[in-house]
Amino acid sequence: MKFYADLHIHSKYSRATSKDLDLEHLYLWAQYKGIQVVGTGDFVHPVWLKELEEKLEPAGEGLFSLKDKYAKPIDAKIPHACRGLVRFMLTVEISNIYKRLDKVRKVHNLIWAPSFEAARKIQAKLGSIGNINSDGRPILGLDSRDLLEITLEADPKNMFVPAHIWTPWFSALGSMGGFDRMEDCFADLTPHVFAVETGLSSDPLMNWRLKQLDPYILVSNSDAHSPSKLGREANIFDTELSYSAIYRALSDENDKGLVGTLEFFPEEGKYHYDGHRLCHVRWHPKQTMENNGLCSRCGKPVTVGVMARVEALADRIEGTKGRRHRPYWNIIPLPEIIGEAKSVGPASKAVQAMYLNMLNHIGSEFYILQDAPVFEIRAVAGDVIAEGISRMRKGDVKIAAGYDGEFGTLEIFKDGERQKIEKQLALF
């Protein structure tokens, strides 16, 4: 069975997240997007874990579904063309801040669990170490290697995935708080890590340039802080719908159950280029080198982004594929394409109205972005939106790269081009 999975999200109990990040809204938006397996996020938070246990029930081995009394009121809001099953997996992200090899390290790690029993064991252990009540993504003074040990002791079938491994401030290989080698981060337990997350600011092509990443399969997830951000990135599986099948697809090098990933254009990510946001300085790594790493306006060090960090650690030319490579497809969230076509923001009422109209008449967002015939899109959404999706599929987009926490800015159409497309296709 082919299905999409987004396994790194947060709940309403994480800082800087939407109050709508609850199971009901995740159930709704998963179907809008076309996602069949969604992470719960934040399972070590006591209040959230209690809510998960109350509202979810087992649905196949290691996965869960929303109980009928919570799901049925939502079903009426879901366009018929988008309706599908949704399963939840127990997931959490931990922020590890600690000193290792004479330097303060700041690393985010994901844990995926097959049962509430395993989740409760992890929760109890981490609760004895630090504060797990104030933030769904708790900040703990715990070595990443030791967190991995706790994870494996709770249940050997738990999965441990270093999150967005290139993000400058909080990742295993980040320029500010990370390491130069995965082995330096996880020490003797490194062989128990079999997957790493690319993050929004890198894609598989960039990660394949490092021989040290050959043992790991690459996964991609949204890191959503609101329900509408689900599926910015996602994984494509073709397996039975179960936790153990997902585990095998990631851990077994001979298993082909992970067939590929959906990726942001990495330039859209918040840390692709170098720069200094406060001074509006956005630099290609070459410019950073020319300025000795110091902001040309304030003289302070710029944040070294993912592109430069990959280049610094790479030991292969671009285009080489890693040992566990999978195909990937770059996508742009549908509201951004609609907004570009209409010259308005993706959160505007006009965009939201068109988005729901397309879901009602065509299907889920992933179907529209990847598979729907262009003529079908044109019939519902018009010439310019159809052309925008066609250009996205070809990679024919222009992006001013993100830097120092600022998302990249997207350009699919040049000034005056929208009107020209409408006139040309109308004549045709």
Image: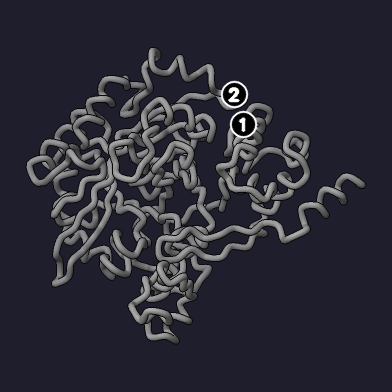
Q: Secondary structure at mark 2?
A: loop
Gap between marks 1 and 2, in whole Å? 8 Å
Label 2 belongs to which residue?
79
For residue 356, which numbered disc appears in the image?
1
10 Å crowding of disc 2: few (<14), some (14-19), many (20+): some
Residue at image coords 48%, 32%: 30
10 Å crowding of disc 1: few (<14), some (14-19), many (20+): some
Amino acid tagged 1: Leu
Residue 290, horizontal then vertical, whole percent: 44, 86
In this picture the colour scheme is one colour
Residue 194, horizontal then vertical, whole percent: 31, 52
Residue at image coords 36%, 21%: 59
Q: Secondary structure at mark 1?
A: helix
Mark 1 and mark 2 lie on one chain; the one further toward the N terminus is 2
Residue 289, horizontal then vertical, whole percent: 42, 84
Q: Residue furthest left?
A: 128
- Identify which residue, 421 or 312, lies in the foreground: 421
